[in-house]
Amino acid sequence: MNRSKIVTGILAFAAMSSCQSSKVRISGRLVGSDARTVYIEEVSPRGDSTLPVDSVVLDDKGNYSFELKKIPSTPTLYNLSYDGESIPLLIEAGDRLTINSAGSLARNYTVEGNEESMLLREFNLAYVESAERLNDIAAEYARCESEEELERLARSYSRAYLRIKQDQVEFIVKNKSSVAAVYALSQRLPGDRYLFNGSGDAIYYRTVADALEERYPESPYLTSLRSEIAQLDAMQTLSAEIVESGFPDLEISNMYGKKVRLSSLKGAVVLVDFWSPSLGNSNALNADLKELYDKYHDRGFEVYQVAIETSKPVWINTVQEQRLPWISVCDLRGESSLALTLYNIRKLPANYLIDRKGDIVAKDLYGTSLEEQLDKLL
């Protein structure tokens, strides 16, 4: 046989094999519901958005089948959704997955054909059950009127919360080289932004990042892990630099790119105000604050306003349109802003009032309440 034909045949076979290996087949049977359509979507590496990929209709017996193309060679997170419920899957090129469920998909499913997805199922089922337990305790707490019973429920909630974190730590350490550990790190609990978001938790992110880099050096999740580590390190550094008077210091850029440090305002009465340019009430709240700023600024009142936003144009345009006269800063990280963590901000708007000595004296003051405090302090 001609040598060139042999080489051409080998290259063609390699190309065909490469094409085939990037495909993934997902099939199975879902029963116990009247819903007929199954959906699959890809989850972004940061976990903050999803992209629809495909949908199929079950046959009369509940069988379904997906064939996905151009799937990455390292495990990537997807969601399989059916009847209003979703389960996470980690898929890589060449997989042949079988996913079955009877009744509730989120609480009763099996997965075969991918080690990472099987690990994810082990974690996810336990986590969903534990999170529901927290919700049940919280709902019972909201209905309860007995002080003694309220204290008992609060203790139960704390114990359940700590148990979840202990279970997650155990799973993460045991499976540190798995992408399933990345998923476990990012899970939210009822009422919390993240389970792992304290400066002391950076060690878990590092442990997973180092192990993942060795096993999956091309994984897209390494970038988000390293970013999270940098943010936690920065939080630890800032926490260590809390000024003697007791408030967490901030150093964030204004619209001109100049970093402004909160502690540089020491000696003034300072309102540290957290807001979102996207919220519909921002204009009215800022209008009220401008009246107080005009009244008290010459007597030593300052506003250090932190915008929670990811779009620089939206932030700057809002500041200029509303003609905000005080210090306006933004780190453009949105809900991932380190400032929210340092000041334990759970919802917007929010603020803290700091007196001339640097002590935090009040929280979430607006209108007349803020004016009364300013009269006392100034």
Image (cartoon, helix red, strand yellow):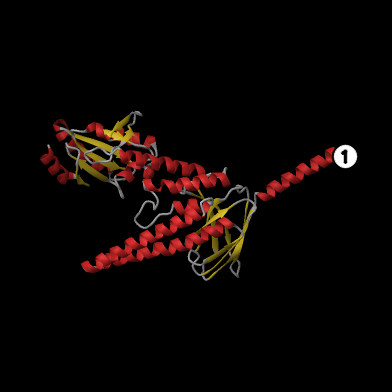
Crowding at dot 1, Cα within 10 Å, few <14 / some 14-19 / many 20+, comes out as few
Count of numbered labels shown in the rendering? 1
Q: Is residue 73 visible?
A: yes
* Quadrant position of the N terminus in the picture: top right
- Left or right: 100, with 107 as reference point: right
Please give left or right for residue 358 compared with residue 196 in the image. Answer: left
Q: Quadrant of residue 15?
A: top right
- Where in the figure is residue 274, as x and y percent of width and height? 28, 42
Q: Which residue is mark 1?
A: 2
Q: Nearer the viewer, residue 136 or 215?
A: 215
Residue beneath the point at 84% across and 40% down: 5
Vertical placement of residue 253 versus 153, above or below: above
223 or 143: which is nearer to us? Answer: 223
> Is any atom of residue 308 visible in this view?
no
On the image, the x and y values in percent for residue 346 come to: 31, 50
- Report whether 2 appears left or right of 343: right
Give percent across and percent down for residue 278: 34, 43
| Residue at horizontal 69 percent and vertical 46 percent from the top | 18
Which quadrant of the figure contains the C terminus? top left
In percent of the image, x 50 and y 45: which residue is there?
209
Q: Nearer the viewer, residue 348 or 160?
A: 160
Along the line of sight, which residue is nearer the eye, 55 or 28? 28
Q: Is residue 56 left or right of residue 200?
A: right
Q: Secondary structure at mark 1?
A: loop
